[in-house]
Image: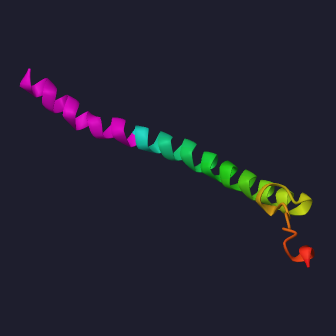
Amino acid sequence: MFLTEIKNLQCMWYLWAMIGCAALCLGIPMYLVYHTDKRKKTAHDKKFRLGRFLSKKKDSDSKS
């Protein structure tokens, strides 16, 4: 029984390596798509003055 446990532990690095590889293969494209879409949305908002680029000017100076 002890020999089978050692053999299983020696093969576990392969499992963790495959999990890490899958995480990288999925995570990097997901991050790039998110980052690209965020950049496109910011450019769109600047163009059409939406969101935080909405120009709301306070009329406090016009009371003179």
Which residue occupies 62% across, 45% down? 30
Considering every residue shown, the one lying at the far top of the view is 1
Image-based side of 53 in relation to 9, left or right: right
Instruction: Identify which residue, 22 or 61, lies in the foreground.
Output: 61
| Left or right for 18, reference 36 | left
Viewport quadrant of the C terminus: bottom right
At 84% from the left edge and 60% from the top edge, which residue is drawn?
A: 54
Asked whether 48 falls inside the magenta stretch, the response is no
> Secondary structure of the magenta portion, mostly?
helix
- Residue 39 lies, in percent from the top left, at 74, 59
Quarter of the picture containing the N terminus is top left
Q: Position of residue 21 (x, y in %)?
A: 46, 44
Q: In the figure, 32 relative to 22: above or below?
A: below
Where residue 62 appears, as percent x and y from the top left, is 92, 74
Between residues 34 and 61, which one lies in front from this camera angle? Answer: 61
- The boundaries of the magenta stretch are 1-17
Q: Residue drawn 42% across and 43% down?
A: 20
Rendered position, 22 above or below 29: above
Q: Is residue 20 found left or right of 50 in the rendered image?
A: left
